Image (cartoon, rainbow, N blue to C red):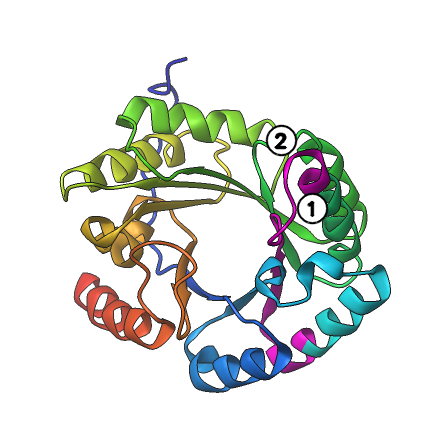
Amino acid sequence: MKVQLKLRKPKTKRPEICLSLSCKNLLEVKHEIAEFGQYAQIIEWCADRMDDAANYTKESFLADAKEVKKLCGRKTFSIDYKAADGEVGEEALKKTNLVMGWAIEIADMIDIDADNPEVDRLVKAARRKRVRTEVSHHEFERMPDRNEIAEMFLRLEKTGADILKVACYAAQEVDTYSILEGASAYSQLNGAKPIVAIAMGEEGQVSRICAGDFGSVISYACGSVPTAPGQFNARQLSKYMDKYYKEEK
């Protein structure tokens, strides 16, 4: 599939910072938001990292979610749940989709794995509740070329999600160009959706700062504990962005 048609010039815009939280309990969530929340516009609660995640019932999950949302204040509250410790195979998928269904009742945004066979159903269910959706594809061991990355965004677009996210591992600094160029190629298409493009790993850290130049609308940061390879904490990322986007003007 070719992506060279109907190109338009992308607009550079500083991405929002999403503080992605890997916490074991609500006390840790409170501490992380207190220390790093001021540097982010979005708070992502990785609910599967909680100590009792595998035992969540609808009541216990929503009780925790309400507490986290309260701590977020007016910031966008995003929920991610992939699979908790001890959940494997069909059990993990069933629990993931059950929890994501509960998340739609309270979140402002949810993150759905692109490989989830129920991604279309979850996107539609979220839309009915006016909850934003981000559909994510991850490559933790390789960096595809720019054309493959652009095509990934086109495939994700078919889910109907509000935001399309592709994160791939950069083994060397030059790998970062592939994802940024692929993101730019997709973003220049007429009708392109908002995207997130990340080169994971230390060699790809620059992508977390400058990806707004290539169409990214969100950049992910951590608190005390990274949730993906190569993350800056939110304070660091905000500082780097302050300098970078000031110089861009």
**Which residue is painted at 68% across and 61% down in the image?**
53
Q: Is residue 154 above or below residue 140?
A: above
Q: Secondary structure at mark 1?
A: helix
Binning the other alpha carbons within 10 Å of mark 2 as few (below 14), some (14 to 19) or many (20 upward) gives some
Marked residue nearer the N-terminal end (2 or 1): 1
Q: Name the spot of residue 21 as percent of width and height, x first.
A: 51, 68
Query: Which three-letter amino acid code belongs to the residue tagged 1?
Result: Thr
Q: Which residues are magenta?
A: 68-93
Using the rendered image of the protein, determine whether residue 73 is visible from the camera's viewpoint.
Answer: no
Q: How many marks?
A: 2
**Which residue is painted at 80% across and 68% down in the image?**
60
Quadrant in which the C terminus appears? bottom left
Q: Nearer the viewer's eye, disc 2 or disc 1? A: 1
The CA span between labels 2 and 1 is: 18 Å
Query: Which three-letter amino acid code belongs to the residue tagged 2?
Result: Thr
Q: Which residue is mark 1?
A: 96
In the image, 241 versus 248, the foreground residue is 241
In the image, 9 versus 47, the foreground residue is 47
**Which residue is painted at 33% across and 19% down in the image?**
4
Q: Is residue 248 above or below residue 3?
A: below
CB under 8 Å between discs 2 and 1 = no
Q: Which mark is residue 45?
A: none
Residue 180 in the figure: left or right of residue 107: left
Residue 12 in the figure: left or right of residue 63: left
Q: What residue occupies the far front of the structure in this picture?
A: 86
Q: Is residue 32 above or below residue 151?
A: below
**Which residue is painted at 50% across and 66% down in the image?**
22
Using the rendered image of the protein, determine whether residue 55 is visible from the camera's viewpoint.
Answer: yes
Q: Which mark is residue 159?
A: 2
Residue 91 in the figure: left or right of residue 138: right
In the image, 53 versus 142, the foreground residue is 53
